Image (cartoon, rainbow, N blue to C red):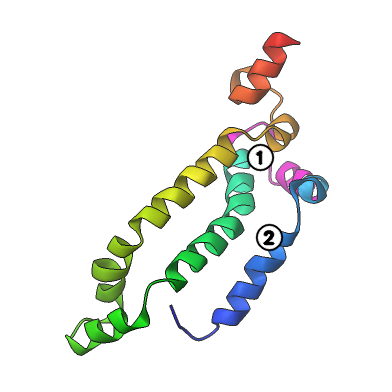
Amino acid sequence: LRFKGRMTINASFYTVYMFSGILLIVPLFKIISSLGLYDTETALIITMVVQTLPTAVFMLKSYFDTIPTDIEEAAMMDGLNRFQIILRIIVPLAISGIVSVFVYCFMVAWNDYLFASIFLSSSEKFTLPIGLNTLFS
């Protein structure tokens, strides 16, 4: 998809993508604590979105780049607006890529140990990897 400001948005996602979770753990802990989100599922949801969003955007951008722009131009000539092109043509063509990225992001979040062990302290809120570690240690 071509739009104004595309390069700036791509650069910001690539910049966030460069930082690993271990580099972000101390600043994230301070932010989560100051917001009063320590020991809540909301803290994990926010960190998982922040961690997986750049990867998802990078993977989907690569997939959307394979869709020919001729299809978009033909749809414009047929009278579709930008939203209709995305909804009726681009999304159905990219559904396999969207599902693949969703499964990948779900697996990353499901297997996360680092953020769950730092941001959760109540045993009833532990995720599966933390609970299994607690059970077997």
Q: Work out whether residue 116 can be spotted.
A: yes
Single out the residue that lies furthest toward the top: 136
Q: Where is residue 63 in the image (x, y as percent from the top left)?
A: 46, 65
Residue 96 appears left or right of 49: left
Q: Position of residue 39 (x, y in %)?
A: 67, 31
Where does label 2 land, which residue?
Answer: 17
Marks 1 & 2, CB-CB < 8 Å contact = no
| Closer to the camera in the image, 61 or 46 | 61
**Main secondary structure of the magenta stretch:** helix
Residue at screen point 59% across, 75% down: 9
Q: Amino acid type of disc 1?
A: Leu
Q: Is residue 90 above or below residue 115?
A: below
Residue at screen point 76% across, 57% down: 19
Q: In this view, does 77 lie above or below 101?
A: below
Q: Position of residue 52 (x, y in %)?
A: 59, 51
Q: Residue 45 carries which label?
A: none
| Magenta region | 27-41
In which quadrant will I find the C terminus? top right
Where does label 1 land, which residue?
Answer: 37
Q: Circle 1 sits in a helix, a strand or a loop, which is it? A: loop
Whether 52 is among the magenta residues is no
Q: In which quarter of the image is residue 87?
A: bottom left
